[in-house]
């Protein structure tokens, strides 16, 4: 009896996982995600038997998902490198990285005329929220402010985030 209950519970979990995977596979491509693990391998193909091409050691690094194959996601990093990662290594948390040669000014509100709070150097990664009108709230380990979205990789021009 106990063995049968475990088998039924396992079947229920399999169904739930399968439907969640199917729902994610139906997302409109491309979309942004971030690396959730402290160490994540990018592979040349969608299986562990393919060689690793990169080892990322930067949690929250934004990536663009460009293709889906079972539990694998073909991603593009901020430098344009593409490869495959396990979906379990990715998060839906929206992050971005400062691009360009100059630091990005972080303002009190979504306007260049407001108080300057911080400056984020090129390569700094932060979490995104409240994007709209060309501005995003950008949080770097608790230091938050509004930045012009054109200075970030990880958000599309004109994209709205709650």
Image (cartoon, rainbow, N blue to C red):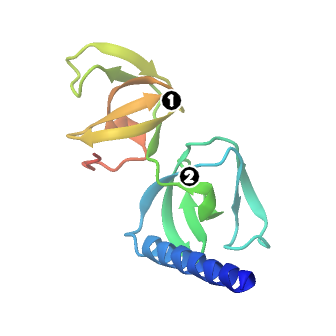
**Up-down relation of residue 131 to residue 76 (above or below):** above
**Local crowd size for mark 2, using a 10 Å CA cut-off: few (<14), some (14–19), many (≥20):** some
Q: Nearer the viewer, residue 23 or 7?
A: 7
The quadrant the C terminus occupies is: top left
> Does the rendering let one see residue 96?
yes
> Does the rendering let one see residue 69?
no
- Label 1: state its secondary structure: loop
Position of residue 83 measured from the top left corner of the image (x, y, whole percent): 63, 63
Residue at left offset 53%, top offset 73%: 68
Apparent side of residue 55 relative to residue 84 in the rendered image (left or right): right
The quadrant the N terminus occupies is: bottom right
**Up-down relation of residue 162 to residue 31 (above or below):** above
The tag on residue 122 is: 1
Residue at left offset 42%, top offset 19%: 119
Q: Nearer the viewer, residue 99 or 59?
A: 59
The tag on residue 77 is: 2
Of the image marks 1 and 2, the number of the one nearer the N terminus:
2
Distance in Å between CA atoms under marks 1 and 2 = 15 Å
- Label 2: state its secondary structure: loop
**Local crowd size for mark 1, using a 10 Å CA cut-off: few (<14), some (14–19), many (≥20):** some
Position of residue 86 measured from the top left corner of the image (x, y, whole percent): 64, 64
Residue at left offset 72%, top offset 73%: 47
Position of residue 124 measured from the top left corner of the image (x, y, whole percent): 52, 31
Apparent side of residue 152 relative to residue 47 in the rendered image (left or right): left
Apparent side of residue 53 relative to residue 130 in the rendered image (left or right): right
The tag on residue 96 is: none
The count of marks equals: 2
């Amino acid at each position: 009896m106990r063995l049968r209950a475990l088998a039924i519970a396992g079947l229920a979990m399999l169904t739930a996982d399968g439907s969640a995977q199917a729902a994610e596979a139906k997302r409109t491509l491309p979309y942004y995600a971030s690396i959730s693990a402290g160490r994540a391998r990018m592979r040349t193909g969608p299986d562990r038997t393919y060689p690793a091409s990169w080892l990322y050691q930067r949690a929250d690094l934004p990536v663009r998902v460009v293709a889906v194959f079972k539990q694998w996601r073909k991603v593009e990093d901020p430098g344009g490198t593409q490869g495959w990662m396990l979906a379990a290594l990715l998060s839906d948390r929206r992050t971005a990285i400062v691009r360009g040669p100059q630091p990005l000014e972080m303002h009190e509100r979504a306007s260049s005329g407001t108080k300057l709070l911080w400056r984020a150097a090129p390569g700094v990664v932060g979490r995104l929220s409240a994007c709209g009108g060309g501005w995003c709230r950008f949080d770097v380990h608790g230091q938050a402010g509004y930045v012009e979205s054109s200075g970030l990789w990880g958000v599309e021009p004109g994209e709205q985030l709650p």
